[in-house]
């Protein structure tokens, strides 16, 4: 069974620290037992959840990691997300069901991403 949980200290030191994103980043890891399937690195502020890095073996795991990070942000009172990472922006476009125009950072209302009807 796949679980998405905060990355353990060993994984964080080995993988996330090498990205040099600063001391205030957080990481969720997708695991199937002991096998790491991917991760998302993000930073939370009072206003934004900044999605910084995504590594996943397939699109379903990538989607789950992004949704998990955004859900956690909403639960902490953060209402907007932003990312300049093209891979993350593609996942956000799939979740939102639309393309985002322009270059650079994508800024979105998180609750609007989860308010979409499935049918």
Image: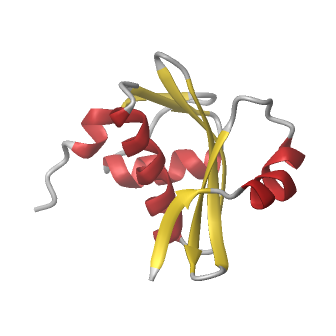
Give above or below for 4 relative to 51: below
Whether residue 89 can be seen here: yes
Residue located 48% across and 33% down the image: 101
Q: Horizontal and vertical percent for residue 15?
A: 82, 56
Which residue is outermost to the top?
46
Using the rendered view, name the quadrant where residue 114 is placed.
top left
Q: Quadrant of the N terminus?
A: bottom left
Q: Horizontal and vertical percent for residue 62?
A: 53, 62
Whether residue 56 can be seen here: no
Q: Is residue 55 left or right of residue 82?
A: right
Give above or below for 95 relative to 4: above
Q: Is residue 46 left or right of residue 9?
A: left
Q: Quadrant of the C terminus?
A: bottom left
Q: Nearer the viewer, residue 8 or 54?
A: 8
Which residue is outermost to the left?
119
Using the rendered view, name the quadrant where residue 109 is placed.
top left
Give above or below for 97 relative to 50: below
Which residue is outermost to the front?
9
Q: How is the image coloured?
A: secondary structure
Residue located 51% across and 69% down the image: 61
Q: Nearer the viewer, residue 63 or 73?
A: 73
Q: Horizontal and vertical percent for residue 39?
A: 64, 59
Residue located 45% across and 37% down the image: 100
Residue located 39% across and 30% down the image: 76
Q: Horizontal and vertical percent for residue 99?
A: 42, 44
Give above or below for 37 relative to 72: below
Using the rendered view, name the quadrant where residue 57 is placed.
bottom right
């Amino acid at each position: 069974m796949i679980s998405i949980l905060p990355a353990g200290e060993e994984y964080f030191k080995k993988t996330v620290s090498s990205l040099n994103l600063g001391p205030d980043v957080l990481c969720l890891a997708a695991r199937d037992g002991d096998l790491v399937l991917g991760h998302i690195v993000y930073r939370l502020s009072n206003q934004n959840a900044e999605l910084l890095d995504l590594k996943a073996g397939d699109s379903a795991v990538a989607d789950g990691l992004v949704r998990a990070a955004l859900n956690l942000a909403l639960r902490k009172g953060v209402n907007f997300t932003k990312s300049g990472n093209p891979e993350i922006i593609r996942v956000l476009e799939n979740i939102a069901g639309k393309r985002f125009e322009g270059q650079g950072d994508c800024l979105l209302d998180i609750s609007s991403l989860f308010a979409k009807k499935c049918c």
